[in-house]
Image (spheres, rainbow, N blue to C red):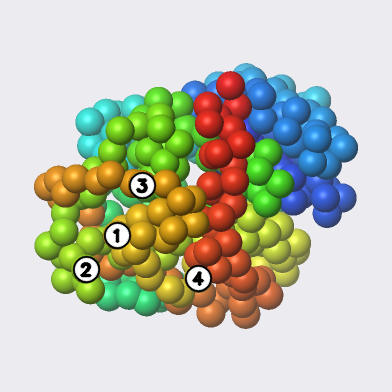
Amino acid sequence: MSLLVTGGTGYIGSHTVVELIEKGHEVVIVDNLSNSSTRVLSRIEALTGVFPTFIQADICDAKAMSDVFSQHDIEAVIHFAGLKAVGESNEIPLSYYQNNVSGSITLFEIMAKFNVKKLVFSSSATVYGENNISPLDESMATSATNPYGQTKLMIENILMDLAKSDTKWSIACLRYFNPIGAHASGTMGENPNGIPNNLLPYVAQVAVGRLAQLNVFGDDYDTPDGTGVRDYIHVVDLALGHIKAVEALNDLQGCQPINLGTGNGTSVLEIVKSFKAISGKDIPYAIVPRRVGDIATVFANADKALTLLNWKAVRDLNTMIEDTWRWQSQNPNGFE
């Protein structure tokens, strides 16, 4: 199958591209490089033997996106492109709505114009808001506590309406939890521009000496050690979930929300302890006030993914941390 992958040079996108190529799919990547680098393309080639087609463009640019579909025979789209930092979204909400929501609408309009109506959308567990009790399942009410989550929820609602309006659409909205880890080779991993917003790349950069200490946002949650509990999933398991979703699009009807998670929760301090044990490095940390919009405990019920996609996460926490450390220790400055 010939696939367009928006945001395909990013963390999750690049790992998914590797798995797509290894499964024999043809890939066209569109990315504006706002939080990624073209250096990942040579890493993809080293792993797969294929240098993927890459187009630097923004999903908000209707002409550029139309040109992509005119020049390539696209059969389905995996849509990762979007701003993704919760804290930042509170500071620059208009940028998040413009990029994530308006950009997605532009993409969907172009897809409809070219009669490409198979889509896997990168959603998030943030759409469950703060009132549901874990394990979270797809039947629960949705809401959002920050602009980032609002953009994901708005796009899901747009896709629900789109699928109702035209039964030819087949859409998987993959609500995933907390991706961590890296390719087992150590050649690809999470490489955020600037200071990391997510826990594991921050911990890894402390361990490798790029950052002085980790800030732990709150230690007074109703959890075993007072720190936030999350469902951490290996990025390769997550990538394979996207492959399964693409392969299921012919059979999926309408717009289906589907959780991708392990069903297990791990606290921030448990992550720090495990990372220290595996890396042999000290991880200095300081307890700081909670962040607005953070929730105590979030983990998935992933039964629907098993039923609809025949997918289940298989890599354990130790593997996630080992692969993260292998990537960071071999590439202390990322792709630079």
Pointer 2 with pointer 3, Cβ within 8 A: no
Residue underneath mark 2: 225
Q: Amino acid at mark 1?
A: Leu
User: At 53% from the left edge and 31% from the top edge, which residue is drawn?
Assistant: 332
Q: Amino acid at mark 3?
A: Asp
Give the structural element (helix, strand or loop) at label 1: helix
Residue underneath mark 4: 262
Question: As drawn, is 69 to the left or to the right of 78?
Answer: right
User: In this orientation, which residue lies closer to the viewer: 34 or 318?
Assistant: 318
Q: Position of residue 194 (x, y in %)?
A: 40, 25
Q: Closer to the N terminus: mark 2 or mark 3?
A: 2
Residue underneath mark 1: 269
Q: Residues within 10 Å of mark 4 (few under 14, many from 20)?
A: many
Q: Closer to the N terminus: mark 1 or mark 4?
A: 4
Pointer 2 with pointer 1, Cβ within 8 A: yes
Q: Closer to the N terminus: mark 2 or mark 1?
A: 2
Give the structural element (helix, strand or loop) at label 3: loop
- The answer to which image quadrant residue 236 occupies is bottom right
Q: CA distance from mark 1 to mark 4?
A: 19 Å
